[in-house]
Amino acid sequence: MSTRYSAQALKEFASTLFASTGIAIDRADTMAEVFLEADLMGFTTHGLNRVASNLHWLQSGVSRLAGQPKVLLDRGSCLNWDAEFLPGPWVVSRAVDEALARVAQFGVVSIVIRRSQHIACLAAYLPKILERNCVGLLTCSTPAERTVAPQGSKTPLFSANPIAFAAPAGDYPLLFDISMSATAGGYVARAAREGKNLPHAYLKDSEGNPSDDPTAFTNGGSILPVGGMDHGYKGAALSAMLEVLSMGLGGYGRADDVAQDDEANSVFLQVIDPQAFGDTQHFLRQTSALTALWSSCEPDGDGEMRVPGKRAWGLRREQLEQGVSLYPLIVEDLQGLAKAHGVSFPSPMG
């Protein structure tokens, strides 16, 4: 059995580290909750794995400790904020709260945010939306990042451009968090750290040849778009769409003078209340039927059939009850932070 840790203890540990920088305790708690939520659902590269970088940004002043997002536009159902480098997990959580407060009135609420510090795991913001029986759509892009090359090119142009979506359904929601790159940069970095190759040729080297070696990326290569070498034009098109929603609607992105080391995100959030379109039960009847029919499809024997949300939601329930199983490198890093900052790392359960 893997070593497990209390979810509450992990949250308190991360919150204590963030609060040590001088950020308000409620903001530290919100950040810790976002990172924990990612690990609860199995998104291990963007959960507590991101504590170290966010702690560094808070300590160094790269992330602002205090202040509110600047409201550039507010039309009731459409808002545009400038986060001015507030911590991403806090500012996006605040945007979700704002959207949920308005969605009963407007039916659909959309918020764009520029210069939000890295927002980590997008799926981590969705449970709160699902608790209100609403649909959530969240995407982000990074104006300074060029890691994904369009099909037919060896020049990186796009950032990973993840998109997360959730809709209430039956026993579990329809939920996914996927990048428009063949793999996330976090997995490439993890493979490089562990001295392993990637499961497939998700990369191009500097000459444009497909590769599974993470050093091909660090030595001037790129990550393939969704669709790979054959159908990558589809992933590139989706990447462009998501940059339009985040950078375009937000009015800040690749057309601006952005520092190369700037990891801030442009964000697009949309919350939809199904009740604005009709009886909620009719909506749930359709989404429940979709997930049930998907689950009942006959396997082809060639691999695992995955209904988006089933595994993540089941893992979340299990880990809340039985404790969180952390990826070994994350434990190693968090224990290092604990020692460096004089904070006790949680003891394993049992």
Image: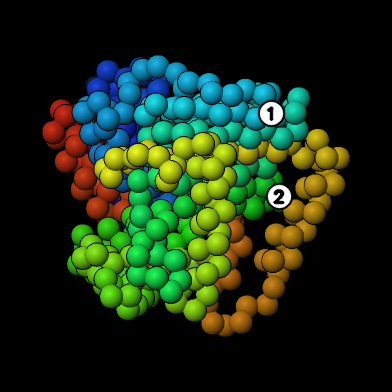
Q: Nearer the viewer, mark 2 or mark 1?
A: 1
Q: Residue at x 83, y 43 (%)?
A: 281
Q: CA distance from mark 2 to mark 1?
A: 25 Å
Q: Is residue 93 left or right of residue 288?
A: left
Query: Which quadrant of the view contains residue 212?
Result: bottom left
Say if 222 sits above or below 161 in the image. Answer: below
Three-letter amino acid code at the position of disc 1 = Ser
| CA neighbours of label 1 inside 10 A, class few (<14), some (14 to 19), many (20+) | some
Q: Residue at x 51, y 36 (%)?
A: 251
Foreground residue among 15 and 155: 155
Say if 162 sits above or below 320 in the image. Answer: below
Q: Can the viewer see residue 96 in this picture? A: no
- Where does residue 143 sit, x and y in percent of width and height? 40, 45
Q: Residue at x 75, y 28 (%)?
A: 106
Q: Is residue 131 left or right of residue 313?
A: right
Secondary-structure class at tag 2: loop
Q: Can the viewer see residue 3 in this picture? A: yes
Foreground residue among 4 and 32: 32
Q: Which residue is mark 2?
A: 169
Secondary-structure class at tag 1: loop
Which residue is outermost to the bottom?
A: 301
Three-letter amino acid code at the position of disc 2 = Ala
- Where does residue 49 sit, x and y in percent of width and height? 31, 46
Say if 75 sits above or below 137 in the image. Answer: above
The quadrant of the image that shows the N terminus is bottom left
Q: Residue at x 68, y 23 (%)?
A: 76
Q: Which residue is mark 1?
A: 77
- Where does residue 28 sit, x and y in percent of width and height? 36, 25
- Where does residue 78 sit, x and y in percent of width and height? 65, 30
Mark 2 or mark 1, earlier in chain: 1
Q: Is residue 101 left or right of residue 82?
A: right
